[in-house]
Image (tube, rainbow, N blue to C red):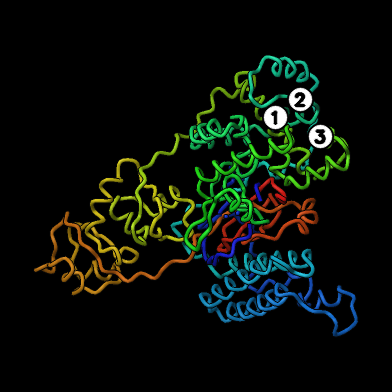
Amino acid sequence: MAVFRSCLPYSISFLLLIPTSSLFPQQPNLHISFFAPAASLSTPESTENSNETYLNSVTRLDGKPAGSFRPTASDLLVQQAEEKFQQGKKSYQVKATEQARQEFDQAVDLMLRASDGPTDRQLYESKLEQMVDAIHRMDLAGLGAATSDLPEFEKTPLEDILTLTFPVDPKLKSKVRDEVVATASQLPLAFNDAVLGYINYFSGRGRRTMVAGLERAGKYRPMIERIFHEEGVPPELIHLAQAESGFLPRAVSNMAATGMWQFMKFRGQEYGLKQTSFTDDRLDPEKATRAAARHLHDLYNQFGDWYLAIAAYNCGPGNVQKAVERTGYADFFELRSRHAIPVETTNYVPIILAMTIMTKNAAEYGLTDVVPESPIEYDTVDISSATHLALIGDLTDTPVSQLTQLNPSLLRNIAPSGYSLHVPKGTGTTLMTAMQNIPEERRASWRMHRVESGDTLAGIAKRYGAVQSSIAEVNKLATDSPAAGDYLIIPANFKEGSAAPLHVSGRHSSKNKHAAAHRAPVSRAHLTRRSQSRSNTRRAFVHHASSGVLALNRN
């Protein structure tokens, strides 16, 4: 993760789903949720450990004389969030579901805005988790999830093994030794028990994880290898993207690291990744890959060693520099043996090495039959005025969900002026020609409709919420029954949708939680339930799930 805190307003009312086939920050939205089965329709008071408010708790724990505690701005936001959450529960109890959903949305948004500086971060995270868990339960019990055309995202499957060690198969040692000697690699290859343990894992019960990553990598491999070559970075470092995000462009961590390469906001800005209310370049696979390559190259120049550069990408160059200064060793495995770097990072480099050795010796590990997904292909058109994706879909015969997948950096269903929009291959020229029929100032709201047999002007107007006479006037129609096959401009009056949900991979494990709490702010992605056993039947409307990342704080 290359280390953000989003200040974008996200809407909470989106379906979240984690496919049972896999597990997992910032652009419009990412998802995953672990839900417990709904036992009843009652309000889930049992999920809250205490009725004591955050401010009361933090005042009591502060230990200062009565009246001397001064809450931070974040503390006051938490107080507002708790009040909004209580209002939502009252609305839920009287079955005012839409109002409850809005109030829960506002409550979670306030909590996420409060992540910068709560007095007690551990208590803050606990309150946030309790709130999200309670909303999840109410959603299953009777609130109902709002639907969305936005794409879903998965949790990276490596998060849950990052702090684990695996047994070493004695038979592997001599085999891997020979492979390392015979393998050509721009990334220096080494092996020890940690690397062998992960090779053993990925050869056995972790094989599905390995294969799924190699399959997904096919969508981006040509682009990543081209950019790495241009920037002087070993192509083997493509495996960082699998470790960071599972090649998910809209992955978001619970510390707000965002995108395929898990950039925090400040680090992304350092490498030219801009964030606006409509777009987040960290979610753009090509832009983020370019930034990641340059960041990795800079880290190599700083430490003079690719293993230390990889470790610094994971936990931050500050942590690695301090470890080197404290121990006097500029050697990753020496720092690892001395427990001088965060525990998650100690296995990060071995995972990358294990993946590299296995993929470069695919036949030896039964990986030659892996079929990678086809590389993404698209046309790029420059948008001259704010344009709704629904209109783009009308003109290219493309579902909005497909357009959001091609444009993961869009935070809303509107492409702003100046945005380079990706559309299905072969549709770019047609789109630009057809767009000339729609006034620039109307492209954020108007639609285009292809008339089907049996369509009437009244029916079309009702479908789009438009005025029948306006449709007739704009299209200069002399009849109420347009001919099948004709295209009609629809002067609709859309309400701008809220930012797409960043669906993410889950949260840090309880082992990592305390360490992460003081290193970086929680992201604008919901903390999700930690129990993997619940991942088979999950659906939720809380879209700010946190994406399972392997990264720590990038200092």
Along the polypeptide, which appears first: circle 1 or circle 3?
Answer: 3
Q: Position of residue 195 (x, y in %)?
A: 75, 29
What type is the residue that disc 2 sits on? Phe
Q: Position of residue 135 (x, y in %)?
A: 63, 68
| Residue holding disc 1 | 353
Report whether 260 appears left or right of 464.
right
The mark closer to the camera, 1 or 3, is 3
Q: Residue at x 24, y 59 (%)?
A: 449
Near-viewer residue (278 or 404)? 278
| Residue holding disc 3 | 330
Helix, strand or loop under label 3 = loop
Q: Position of residue 261 (x, y in %)?
A: 60, 45
Report whether 99 appears left or right of 210.
left
**Residue at mark 1 to residue at mark 2: CA–CA distance:** 8 Å
| Residue holding disc 2 | 191
Near-viewer residue (407 or 381)? 381
Helix, strand or loop under label 1 = helix
What type is the residue that disc 3 sits on? Ala
Q: Mark 1 near mark 2, Cβ–Cβ under 8 Å?
A: yes
Near-viewer residue (415 or 175)? 415
Q: Position of residue 341 (x, y in %)?
A: 81, 43
Q: Residue at x 37, y 62 (%)?
A: 386
Q: Quadrant of residue 448?
A: bottom left
Helix, strand or loop under label 2 = loop
**Residue at mark 3 to residue at mark 2: CA–CA distance:** 18 Å
| Classed neighbour count for the residue bearing mark 2: other residues with Cα under 10 Å, few (<14), some (14–19), many (≥20) | some
